[in-house]
Image (tube, rainbow, N blue to C red):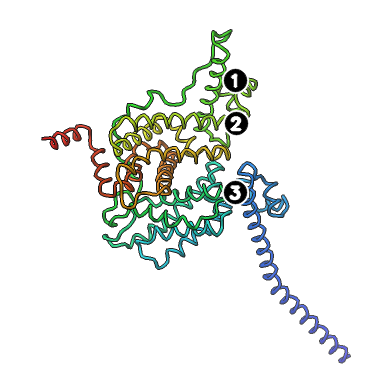
Amino acid sequence: MSGMDTSSDSACELSTRIRFCARRRLAVARPAQTMAQNARKRTQRERLLRGMVEATNRGGYAGANVSAVIAEAGVSRPTFYDYFADRDACFRGSIEDVEGELLEAVEQALQGRPAQEAMGAAVTALVAYAGAEPARARFLMGESMTAGAGALDVRDRGIARIASAIEDAQDHAASQASLPDLDARVAIGSVYRILATRLRRGQTEISKLSEELLAWMGAYVRPAGQRRWQTLTPGPVPARSPHIPNVPIPQSPGILPPGRPRLSKREIAENHRLRILHAAARMTEQKGYAATTIEDLMKLASVDGRRFYRQFADKQEVFAALHEFGFQHVMDVTAKAFFAAEGWPERSWEAGRALTQLLQESPVIARVGFVEAYAVGPSAVQRVEDSHFAFMFFLQEGLVYAPRESPPSRMAMEAIISAIFEIIYLQARVDGEPQIAAMLGPIAHVWLTPFLGVREADAFIARRQRPAKARKRSRKSAVD
């Protein structure tokens, strides 16, 4: 009996040991299993984020639907919805993912660098990243602008974080240290635009851009304690330009009266066309391009489907026509103001005055031309980039007016236009009423300084910002 008891005790002890060991193995295995599951989830999420980048670069935002993304990622549709509520959430997550990489690269580039090199180091890091990761850089710097307000918010926050890192590095500069007198958000946004254009076209010589971009920023350098333009601060708005139309653009021609109108078929068709364009302008303000439907346009324009499709094939064509309509008005007003003045700096100021005031009074043109156009599709993006080069015409005369030992390069002029577009874009996106007209001072600084130099450009802007009576007294005193 005692032996049996002993055997029983031994079995019990063995059983207890086995259970203890099993529990211990389970306790060890569970964290390992959990880690493996977490790693698999991270891998799946990363594959989806990268799949979104690839799908967007190949087919644009419109083509980057869930089916395209999961095909690129090699995961199932239910797996997609395990991580993202919808396509837009995945798109925004992909922007944030690339932004995180880029911000890390910028922060590493800033470590140990003197304050006066911060802006240049950040720009060099951006160009290096675009050269090393062209697909991801193209997605972040270009395609992020094609997906509506949510994606633009993420894009802008990323630029603001890079700008903040630059400003933190510059905060330690001595008052006499030489720093670029530029808003860091505008500088980085301009570089984004320049890189996006080249990446979209498949250009490979990206790394060579650093030298010219640094030379462009060098034109704005001045002692840190004397900087005036490092933040976008609204300034005085000059008297209204005489070249601006007296009514906001576009205007609706009004609905035709019932019955047989005494108009030609061509006039009737133009009436329908302008009403649809005006409806598109209204819907841009209310909902934006992405959320607007053809039904919205037909209802607001009071046209039926037959009349709509006589004018336009789809929504994309309507907004492309609206962008072209606005661009033609902008160029017409800006060119008239430019050629009405004498001397290139005065021409430039008057062109800027007319441009900013036109966009202030017709905010839908600013919204469509500088924000929503990117969402319309590749053809509209191409028109935006073409408009950059059209505006470069106004800079060409500056090379003759102010010949310098190192005149602004073509790249520098492209950067000037890109920076001006970024300033207007930022204002067009603000909550509440934009202050585009009040940005004439910062725009003139970006425009004139590489040609005139910091001191002369500042002096010119200061003179032009004086009230008209004070300018007349100053001229009279100079004559006397």
Quadrant of the rendered image containing residue 73: bottom right
Whether residue 405 can be seen here: yes
Please provide percent x and percent y for residue 205: 52, 55
In the picture, the disc for residue 303 is 1
- Secondary structure category for the residue under label 2: helix
Disc nearer the start of the sequence (3/2): 3
Whether residue 86 can be seen here: no
- Secondary structure category for the residue under label 1: loop
Quarter in which the C terminus is drawn: top left
Q: Nearer the viewer, residue 339 or 291?
A: 339
Q: Are marks 2 and 1 in contact (CB under 8 Å)?
A: no
Q: Is residue 111 left or right of residue 172?
A: right
Q: Quick check: 423 above or below 211?
A: above
Quarter in which the N terminus is drawn: bottom right
The amino acid type, in three-letter code, at marker 3 is Phe
Quadrant of the rendered image containing residue 23: bottom right
Please provide percent x and percent y for residue 178: 30, 59
Give the residue pinned by disc 3. 91
Pointer 1 local density, CA inside 10 Å: few below 14, some 14–19, many at least 20: some
Give the residue pinned by disc 2. 315
